[in-house]
């Protein structure tokens, strides 16, 4: 299964994603609390997949996605955002996000 980095400023969201993904057999190689932390941990941990919240302090998910894609154009990043942020979701897809999931997320949608 995949080695995954979870990037989200919400401890609750990180815990829910960790539990769901680990129960499905994936390995969570790390967690980050903002985009800057996520970018640094991506370089350190080299995960196969990143789940990235869009709205975070310090550096948002779109900026972090851009930096990650700059150092690894093959990086797989799935954006997670609150409903109603269509413009940000479109921007994330333009910058190379694989997919996006809206919060509150559906377990099956995350696993797919």
Image (tube, helix red, strand yellow):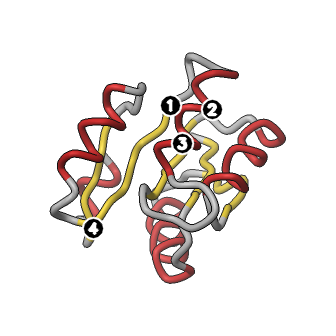
Categorize mark 2 by other alpha carbons within 10 Å: few (<14), some (14-19), many (20+).
many
Q: Is residue 68 visible?
A: yes
Going from N to C along the chain, the mark reached first, 1 or 2, is 2
Going by the picture, which residue comes out furthest to the top?
A: 73
Which numbered disc, 1 or 2, marks the residue closer to the eye? 2
- Which of pointers 3 and 2 lies earlier in the amino acid sequence? 3
User: Which badge, 1 or 3, comes first in the chain's sequence?
Assistant: 3
- Mark 1 or mark 4, which is nearer the start of the sequence? 1
State the image quarter where residue 58 is shown. Answer: bottom right
Residue drawn where x is 19% and y is 64% of the image:
83
| Label whose residue precedes the other's in the sequence (4 or 3) | 3
| Element carrying mark 2 | helix
Which residue matches tag 2?
Answer: 68
Residue 2 in the image, given as x and y percentages of width and height: 57, 40
Query: In front: mark 3 or mark 2?
Result: 3
Is the residue under label 2 in contact with that under label 1 (CB below 8 Å)? no
Residue named by callout 3: 63
In the rendered view, tell whether residue 93 sits above or below residue 45.
Answer: above
State whether residue 94 is above or below residue 16: above
Measured in 3D between alpha carbons, the distance from the residue under mark 3 to the one under mark 2, in whole angstroms, is 9 Å
Residue 108 drawn at (x, y percent):
24, 57
């Amino acid at each position: 299964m995949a080695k995954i980095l979870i990037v989200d400023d919400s401890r609750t969201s990180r815990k829910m994603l960790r539990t769901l993904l680990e129960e499905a057999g994936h390995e969570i190689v790390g967690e980050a609390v903002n985009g800057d932390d996520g970018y640094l941990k991506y370089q350190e941990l080299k995960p196969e997949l990143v789940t990235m919240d869009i709205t975070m302090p310090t550096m948002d998910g779109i900026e972090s996605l851009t930096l990650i894609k700059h150092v690894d154009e093959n990086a797989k990043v799935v954006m997670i955002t609150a409903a109603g942020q269509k413009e940000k979701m479109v921007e994330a897809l333009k910058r190379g996000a694989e997919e996006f999931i809206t919060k509150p997320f559906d377990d099956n949608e995350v696993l797919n």
